[in-house]
Image: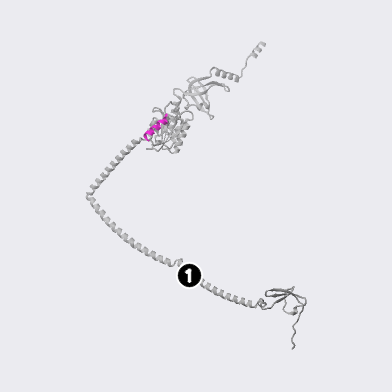
Amino acid sequence: MTSEILNIEQRRIWSVSELNREIRKLLEEKIGYIWLSGEISNWRVAPSGHAYFTLKDADSEITSAMFRGYLQNVKFQPENGMEVLVFGQITVYEKRGTHQIIVEQMEPKGVGALQLAFEQLKKKLEAEGLFDPAHKKELPLLPKKIGIVTSPSGAAIRDILKVLSRRFANIHVVLYPARVQGDGASGEIVEGIRFLDQYGVDVIIVGRGGGSIEDLWSFNEEIVVRAVYEARTPIISAVGHEIDFTLTDFSADVRAPTPSAAAEMVIQDQTVLWENIQTRKQQLLRAIKQTVQLYRHRIEMAQQHRGFQSIKNFIREYMLRLIDCRNQLEDWWEWERETLHSRIQKAKYALQIMSPQSRIKVQKEKLDFIRKQLEQKINVLLQAIKSKYSFSIAKLDTLSPLKVLGRGYSLVWLEPGHKLVRCVEQLDIGNSVKMQFTDGSADAIIKTVEHKKESQP
């Protein structure tokens, strides 16, 4: 019994977590990162942006996951049933004890990833109608202002400017500098298209020189293709060489095989254009001359016909009738004009008689007459008042005490009451009096009082 107990105590007991952890370490250390081939099934992208799917072959399958950061770098759209090559790390999901591969890279099997992405996006946009010929706009015959979206240091801009200068030296060119490959290039191309579309150029050339599919990929980006489609200005796509095709070529209004060809498409040679104008001018003059001769011949033939003579007589008769009617109309109008003039003169005379101005003039004359009469009466009244005033002044002057004083008399007042002394009975000896003369006054003291003796009967 003791031996059996010891054997049991010497056993190593693993937990499930320890076992799964150990298996994960063994897989990551022994196998680690590998390339794996298989078919995609149960493809699902979670709201977090991570993709979960199963990779299988004819006999087996393995759970797979691809995190959002790696999925964003995949150029094509993975689909169920697609054969792919994936690169990732073999590991174990310890919670469930299942092994899986964490995918970091994915390529389509048998075809390049960019080529597959190209075909997938082309199919999608074509279904939306972005490549419909009905949407294509015609290029202007003679644009005044040409916009170009390309690299300012590339060969494409040099080729375009060289051709434009040779064909039409005084053309106005607006360059929007943009990167044409690498990260951020597609965004700059879109900005250039939208800016020139708003700026008001007559046509836009978007392009660059040739290169690999990786170099030209910016012109396969969906945002660039849609910007070309949505522009109101006609756009020429001039990307790469003649054998190169991008999705921008399909959404543009015109595809040029090279940038130089785009320059030749956008503007005609000035000399050739002038020759074409002269040729068209001569053709037009000849056509006009032939048309004139044809109608002149028809008129001459018609004049020789008997029906034409009857028509001429018919027209002549109605011309005479028309002239007679015109004369009658002129006579009637002259009579109407004189009648109207007479009525206007009578109305004018009546208006003058009834005019308020005439009545105002009469009333004004009456008012002036009344005003003059009033002035005369006022003057007479003033003279009478003035005479009466002068008489009163003379009479008052005659009755004035000062006048009496001037003849040697004086006035005496009893002080301090300043009471006029009218008789001697008012005075007593010792009274103070003030005497008023014509030229001044004097104070005095009464020393004696003499009464007038009454006469005997």
In x, y percent, where is residue 447?
77, 77
Taking the spot 70% from the left edge, 73% from the top edge, the residue there is 441
- Amino acid type at circle 1 is Glu
Tell me where residue 271 sits by quadrant.
top left
- Check the image and report above or below for 417 versus 306: below
Q: Start and end of the magenta stretch?
A: 155-168
- Toward the bottom, the furthest residue is 457
Dot 1 corresponds to which residue? 365
45 magenta-colored: no
161 magenta-colored: yes
Main SS, magenta residues: helix
Q: Nearer the viewer, residue 299 or 281?
A: 281
Confirm whether residue 51 shows in the render.
no
Q: Nearer the viewer, residue 440 or 179?
A: 440
Tell me where residue 135 sits by quadrant.
top left
In x, y percent, where is residue 82?
46, 24
- Check the image and report above or below for 381 versus 303: below
